[in-house]
Image (cartoon, rainbow, N blue to C red):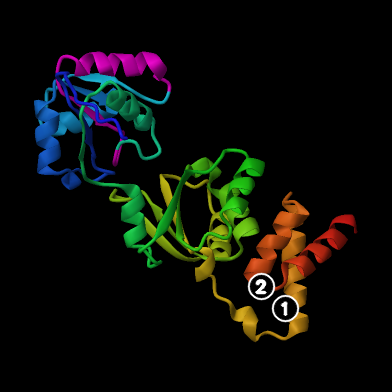
Amino acid sequence: MVELREAFTVGTLYLVATPLGNLEDITLRALRILREARVIAAEDTRHTRKLLNHFAIATPTISYHEHSGPVGIAAVLAALAEGDVALVSDAGTPAISDPGADLIGAALTAGYPVVPIPGPSAVVTALIASGLPTSEFTFLGFLPRRSQERRAVLLSISHEPRTLVIYEAPHRLRASLDDLLAVLGDREVCLARELTKVHEQWLRGTLSALKARYDGQDEPRGEYTLVIAGASQVPQSQTEEEPEALAIRARDRLRELLAAGNGTRDAAAVVAREFGLPRREMYRVALELAVS
């Protein structure tokens, strides 16, 4: 039997989505909640204060961010015991690739109601304008910082047929593009930069074209969301190729994956799926390449 908890406490935790950049994107309901809450728990109180000042909202703020830990959660729960708390991130919807999820779990466990106030989200904003399928998608958040760990994650979802959505920081964009191309192959991609801001930019094409563009430019700047074609969306033009040409391309792809640090079994599985070839045969070739 599922246990239902009834809240005997005072406050409600509101999850308030705030603009990604353009302040006109905030909802009327969000403004009302921010005004009526007893306190606002903000990822960066200085950043949030700019938003509040713009709309003449005087509600006090407390800090809650990724380093707050149990002490920060306890502070927000103490505030909830006295009234409503509005949780906001620096931009977009709370708990999406930020520490809000831990706080939400703690509030629910303590018996406090949790109410979402929908609004802007970089995931959905980038996805709907990407031109790629939107009926199903997989959100990966930020990829690991280290290339080896990043490639391991990408390899684990290389068979995923759904559209992929990824966040990336500017200083890791080039390295991530290298790994995306090496592990996933040359898929269709849409890169959204600085969503809803003055310098909003959309780039659509292939991973190789995007990599070439940024390899030849200055350091990337801004906030990036990448929308990448799922495995089933990758063009299968190889079905019309001559067997010899197909075998050469498959061998080159195996060599590329092995050089990137992938194991023979994993590399064989990826190539077998991408080229429609027998996995056992690809594993045999991978073993040959690994010892050559």
Identified at 64% across, 43% down, the residue is 147
The quadrant of the rendering that contains the N terminus is top left
**Magenta segment:** 67-93
Q: Quadrant of residue 69?
A: top left
Q: Quadrant of the C terminus?
A: bottom right
User: Which label sits on residue 270?
Assistant: none
Q: Which label number is shown at residue 275?
A: 2
Q: Is 86 located above or below residue 18 in the figure?
A: above
Q: Give residue 246's mark.
A: 1
Q: Residue at the spot x=43%, y=21% of the render?
A: 67
Q: Secondary structure at mark 2?
A: helix
Give the residue at x 19% y 47%: 25
- The answer to whether residue 32 is visible is yes
Which amino acid does the dot numbered 1 rest on? Leu
Q: Quadrant of residue 112?
A: top left
130 left or right of 230 in image? left
The mark nearer the N terminus, 1 or 2, is: 1
Left/right placement of residue 158 relative to residue 119 reads right
Residue 91 inside the magenta-drawn segment: yes
Q: Position of residue 272 (x, y in %)?
A: 68, 68
Tags 1 and 2 touching, CB below 8 Å: yes
